[in-house]
Image (cartoon, helix red, strand yellow):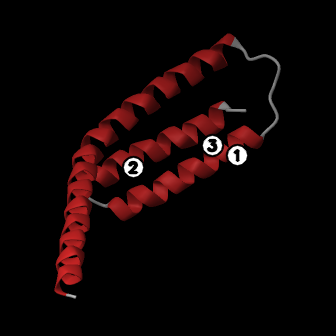
Amino acid sequence: MLTTAICAEIEERYELMLQAVESGDFDRAVQLQHEIDRLRSEAEASPSTPERHPEEVEALRARLVRILELDRQIGTYLAPLHDETKKLLLAQRRDRAVRSAYQASDS
């Protein structure tokens, strides 16, 4: 169950991840993503409580909205890098296929 404490820790990691991608520290961003994954697993494994106080629900809602906003901001940094990496990998695959085809025709 997602608690206010776990949600706060996840939000903190997202804040740090945004700072990491803004500064180009992608190794740190990956490390933070692993921490977030661990926290999510911890939340999923913890027992659920039957009822929450309205204040806790509102606090969780506000944190989740912020996490989604941070995720969107992080995505604006990572999407162009993802696209560029994809282009490079496709070009490498195409080059290998061309070399393979020419090697096969030489045989």
Residue at (26% x, 62% y) in the render: 89
Q: Answer above or below: position of 93 versus 22.
A: below
Circle 2: is it few (<14), some (14-19), or many (20+) Cα within 10 Å? Answer: many
Instruction: Please indicate whether residue 71 sits to the left or right of residue 2 in the image.
Output: left
Q: Position of residue 1 (x, y in %)?
A: 73, 32
Instruction: Please indicate whether residue 21 sits to the left or right of residue 68 in the image.
Output: left
Inspect the image, locate mark 1, and give the three-letter code of the amino acid beneath it. Glu
Residue at (17% x, 86% y) in the render: 106
Inspect the image, locate mark 3, and give the three-letter code of the amino acid beneath it. Arg
Q: Position of residue 7 (x, y in %)?
A: 59, 35
Tag shown at residue 42: 1
Q: Position of residue 80 (x, y in %)?
A: 21, 47
Residue at (72% x, 14% y) in the render: 53
> Dividing the image into 4 quarters, which one contains the C terminus?
bottom left
Instruction: Looking at the image, tell me whether mark 3 or mark 2 is earlier in sequence order.
Output: 2
Instruction: Looking at the image, tell me whether mark 2 or mark 1 is earlier in sequence order.
Output: 2
Determine the secondary structure under disc 3.
Answer: helix
Residue identifier under label 2: 17
Residue identifier under label 3: 40
Q: Nearer the viewer, mark 3 or mark 2?
A: 3
Residues marked 3 and 1 touching at CB (< 8 Å): yes
Determine the secondary structure under disc 1.
Answer: helix
Answer whether residue 11 is visible to the viewer in this image. Answer: yes
Determine the secondary structure under disc 2.
Answer: helix
Residues marked 3 and 2 touching at CB (< 8 Å): no
Circle 3: is it few (<14), some (14-19), or many (20+) Cα within 10 Å? Answer: some
Marks 3 and 1 sit apart, C-alpha to C-alpha, by 5 Å
Residue at (70% x, 46% y) in the render: 42
